[in-house]
């Protein structure tokens, strides 16, 4: 008589063994279900935070892009800004240290443009704003 047939000959013992195995399986199923639920909540939270981070990054880039347009002396619609607004925009460039390499190139371009062509010479306060912003950006890189 093998082991299985021996256990089945005693229905009470077999029932106890199968009940114990079933209880353990039920406990494991409960643990697995809890783990899956917790993992789903953690994944949803991570995905939410990742999406918010991407939205914030896009928002900062849009703000930076708008500032660069103003630094050029124009509005988004192509209207000319006065030089005071242009200087204010230049002073806002160091608020975006993550884009410092781009900002430095833009500033260098306008410094070169202002010194090269007399027709596009900038007022001294705008040149000062450009050099000050350059100094601040160089410190951040």
Image (cartoon, grey):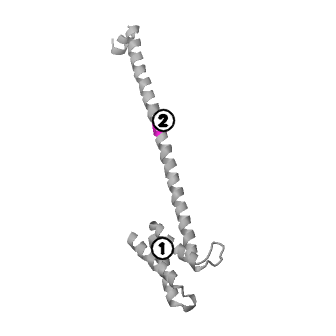
Residue beneath the point at 45% across and 79% down = 131
- Viewer-proximal residue, 51 or 20? 51
Label 1, label 2: how far apart the Cα atoms are: 46 Å
Residue 61 position, x and y percent, is 53, 64
Quadrant in which the N terminus is drawn:
top left
The residue furthest bottom is: 118
**Is residue 39 found inside the magenta-colored segment of the image?**
yes
Q: Which mark is residue 103?
A: 1
**Residue identified by numbered label 2:** 37
* Label 1–label 2 contact, CB within 8 A: no
Residue at disc 2, secondary structure: helix
Q: Is residue 5 above or below residue 132?
A: above
> Looking at the image, is mark 1 or mark 2 nearer the viewer?
1
- Which SS does the magenta portion mostly show? helix
Q: Is residue 42 above or below residue 112?
A: above
How many C-alpha atoms fall within 10 Å of the one at disc 2: few (<14), some, or many (≥20)?
Answer: few
Q: Which residues are magenta?
A: 36-40
Q: Which mark is residue 19?
A: none
Residue 30 position, x and y percent, is 45, 27
The disc, 1 or 2, on the residue closer to the chain's N-terminal end is 2
Residue 98 position, x and y percent, is 45, 66
Q: Is residue 141 visible?
A: no
* Side of 2 where 34 appears, left or right: right
- Viewer-proximal residue, 128 or 97? 128
Residue at disc 1, secondary structure: helix
Residue beneath the point at 63% across and 79% down = 80
Residue 59 position, x and y percent, is 55, 61
**Is residue 79 found inside the magenta-colored segment of the image?**
no
Q: Is residue 3 visible?
A: yes
Quadrant in which the C terminus is drawn:
bottom left
**Count of all numbered marks drawn on residues in the image:** 2
């Amino acid at each position: 008589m093998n082991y299985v047939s021996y256990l089945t000959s005693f229905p009470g013992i077999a029932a106890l063994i199968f009940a114990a195995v079933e209880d353990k399986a039920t406990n494991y199923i409960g643990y697995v279900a809890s783990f899956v639920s917790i993992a789903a909540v953690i994944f949803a939270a991570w995905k939410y935070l990742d999406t918010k981070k991407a939205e914030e990054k896009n928002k900062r880039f849009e703000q930076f892009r708008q500032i660069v347009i103003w630094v050029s002396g124009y509005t988004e619609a192509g209207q000319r800004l006065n030089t005071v607004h242009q200087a204010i925009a230049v002073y806002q460039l160091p608020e975006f240290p993550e884009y410092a390499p781009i900002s430095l190139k833009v500033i260098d371009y306008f410094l070169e443009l202002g010194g090269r062509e007399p027709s596009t010479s900038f007022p001294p306060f705008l040149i000062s704003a450009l050099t000050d912003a350059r100094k601040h950006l160089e410190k951040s890189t």
